[in-house]
Amino acid sequence: MEQVLEFISVNKEMFYLVALMIFLGIELIEKVPSVLHTPLMSGANAIHGVVIIGAIIILGEATDTVSKILGFIAVVLGTLNVVGGFVVTDRMLDMFKKKKKQN
């Protein structure tokens, strides 16, 4: 428990920055028109793939248990985000395909 509190006290600025990024992201996404969601999701999926690679590299360099657990959680959540994003993008793109006529 002391290690966690020490980590938080040492990295206060990081937590403030993450909170600011969350609020900024929510504000930006609310302002995006629905027509642009599909291209933006595809771009976000590509960026998140890079984040997963970074999390895997950091996880490989981790020495203490807390870092390994956080790295593993980052890899799992990042992977779920990428897969879910591609599934949603695929479904949205299927809506724009022409339907075959039945005879």
Image (cartoon, rainbow, N blue to C red):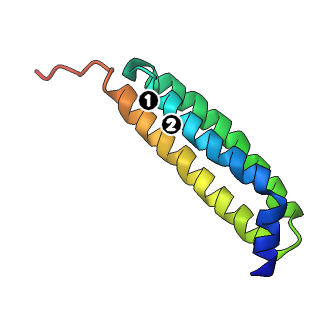
Front residue of 28 and 65: 28
* Callout 1 amino acid: Glu
Relative placement, left or right, of 62 versus 42 is right
Residue appearing at x 81%, y 76% in the figure: 3
In percent of width and height, residue 70 lies at 71, 65
Q: Are marks 2 and 1 in contact (CB under 8 Å)?
A: yes
At 38% from the left edge and 23% from the top edge, which residue is drawn?
34
> Could you say which disc has been placed on residue 30 in the image?
1
Q: Is residue 66 above or below residue 39?
A: below
Circle 2 — which element? Answer: helix
Q: Where residue 78 appears, x then y in whole percent?
A: 62, 51
Residue at image point 60% right, 52% down: 79
Q: 66 or 45, which lies in front?
A: 66
Q: Which residue is mark 2?
A: 26
Relative side of 21 to 90, left or right: right
Residue 68, percent from left and from top:
77, 69
Q: Position of residue 37 (x, y in %)?
A: 45, 26
Residue extending furthest bottom?
1
In-front residue for pair 30/55? 30
Quadrant housing the C terminus: top left
Structural crowding at the residue carrying mark 2, measured as other residues with C-alpha within 10 Å and reported as few (<14), some (14–19) or many (≥20): few
The amino acid type, in three-letter code, at marker 2 is Ile
User: Which of the 4 image quadrants contains residue 11?
Assistant: bottom right
Find the distance from the CA under tag 2 to the CA under tag 1.
Answer: 6 Å
Label 1 Cα crowd, 10 Å radius (few <14 / some 14-19 / many 20+): few
Q: Quadrant of the N terminus?
A: bottom right
Q: Is residue 67 left or right of residue 73?
A: right
Instruction: Assign a secondary structure to mark 1.
Output: helix
Choose top left, top right, bottom left or bottom right for residue 58: bottom right
Across the whole image, how many numbered discs are drawn on residues? 2
Which mark, residue 64? none
